[in-house]
Image: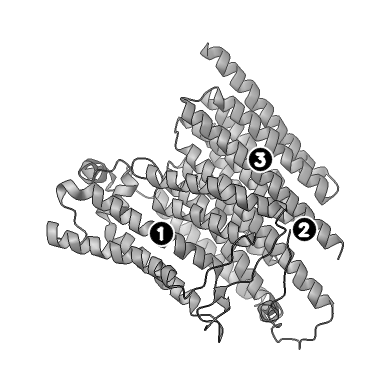
Amino acid sequence: MTVVVSLAVALLLLALAVWTVIARDAFPAVAGFIAYGLLLSLVWVRLDGIDVALTEAAIGGGLTGALLLGAVGRLRGTEAAAESERCGVGLRSFAMLLALAVTAVLMLCVLALPEPAPTVAPQVVQNLGATGVGNPITGVLLAFRALDTLLEAIVLVIALIGVWSLAPEGAWGGRPGLRHFSDPDGVLAYLARLLPPIGIIVGIYLFWAGADHPGGKFQSATILAAMWMLVIMAGLADSPRTDHRGLRGGVVAGPLAFIAVGLLGLASAGAFLGYPPQWAKPMIVAIELALMPTLVLVLALLMNGTPARDGDR
Amino acid sequence: MSFVFDLLSIAAIAAGGLFYLAGTVGLLRFPDAYTRLHALTKADNLGLALIVLGLLFQADSLLAGLKLVLIWLLVMLSGAAVSQLVARAERRRESL
Amino acid sequence: MAEFLLWMAAFVVLMVALGLLRVARGPGRAERMMAAQLLGSGAIGALLLIGAAAGEPSVVDVALTLALLSAFAGVAFVKFAVRQDRQAEDDGAGRVSAPGRPRRSALEREARKVVQ
């Protein structure tokens, strides 16, 4: 019954992980990794973490896979050099033993947790009414630990700047990646015309449902970014110029608005990112609305990669 | 009445599982990439369709049922498109 | 009813596992590309069954997300594989590059790539 499902999925995950690590070629390894991510969302559902399952399905399933495939494509020229630098069996066995030891210690720690495990979940549920949202995850992310979310958003922007800084000489400010083309009457163009509208509606629905049900801005931003990437990959639109003012404005607008709301909280409730009692829900919604475009832009631009052409106009 | 629904659900879902089995057996045993793609798509279209049909009988509301049907339509659309793309990529590789 | 649904979910996961054998062993690139589609439909089926068994309606949203993202992952796979084939084709056409030096990147050639 439940044990059988859990055991089946756990064994499958282990097999997938082993295969991803020992695969000789990069392509099967990435295929295994994507499969691993998609299957991990099943695990999260079994553990009652629906929000985490949503994020895992979105990020682990699509986004990371596309990122890794792009990276593997760029590494193709260096594969010969990497092969010659491959370390010996002894070192690799030692690394494997070390990894297994860390896993064993983690397992022992989890099994040694007292029953019930220490948690602040009851206090979160108790105080959730004050925030005005029904989903405890959203409450934690945007009310109780809003500072963490702000810092994560800023880290994303910094990551994007880091990726852009790898642009080759003369390409700064240009468009990332190659221009994709596809037959305008072909299957890919058809899919890229039909799927994104549905994806956008699902994304907006998930964003709106995030207040009271599992969902939220991050998962919906991932879906929207993936739909945009699909349109770019089908050649129906070109990747955006990275020196476009609106684009850069959109990327920084989210964290700036978040900081502004925080300062507003400082003025009205006495603490940075504090919310005055009746204004909690509107302020949370304002933060979410401001962060959404930023997240979509940052995730899509990260997937696009470094600027490569039409630079330094 | 709900007993009839339960029975229909069990029948549909069991049939769906059968198509998943058929898809996997085809995937493992068929000789080349195109036939394997064909087997794989059977699991998508028919297997998932029957599972969704079975779950429709258990659905609580119209909205829940519509979401299930939407998922099935999306999987069909993406399965059809991706199968085409994979087959063409394979054809192109063979002609190199 | 819930028991039956969970058993069927386990069965679907088992089918996915067996299908992954083909993805792992598959002699060609096409088999690897099928991973996204196989996992997508299998995991969605299992998710819907688990969600119905647990009576949790929001699991359907996870399945919806998976459907969209596995479509995207499948397309990404195919584009990548086609680009690799094209690069291998160019390699085979006798481009000169010293061993150990990274190959001149395709970006510098600005070739027009037609992909179906």
Residue for badge 2: B89
Q: Chain of mark 2?
A: B
Of residue A100 and residue A60, the one placed in the foreground of this image is: A60
Residue A114: x and y, percent?
33, 46
Q: Secondary structure at mark 1?
A: helix
Co-location on one chain, circles 2 and 1 = no
Distance from Cα at disc 2 to Cα at disc 1: 35 Å
Q: Residues within 10 Å of mark 1 (few under 14, many from 20)?
A: many
Residue C116: x and y, percent?
74, 58
Q: Chain of mark 3?
A: B
Picture quadrant of residue A77: bottom right
Q: Count every numbered label the image shows and give the total.
A: 3
Q: Is residue A31 above or below residue C57?
A: below
Colour basis: one colour
Q: Earlier in the sequence, mark 3 or mark 2?
A: 3
Residue for badge 3: B76
The kind of residue on which mark 3 rests is: Met
Q: Residues within 10 Å of mark 3 (few under 14, many from 20)?
A: many
Residue for badge 1: A293
Q: Is residue A224 visible?
A: yes
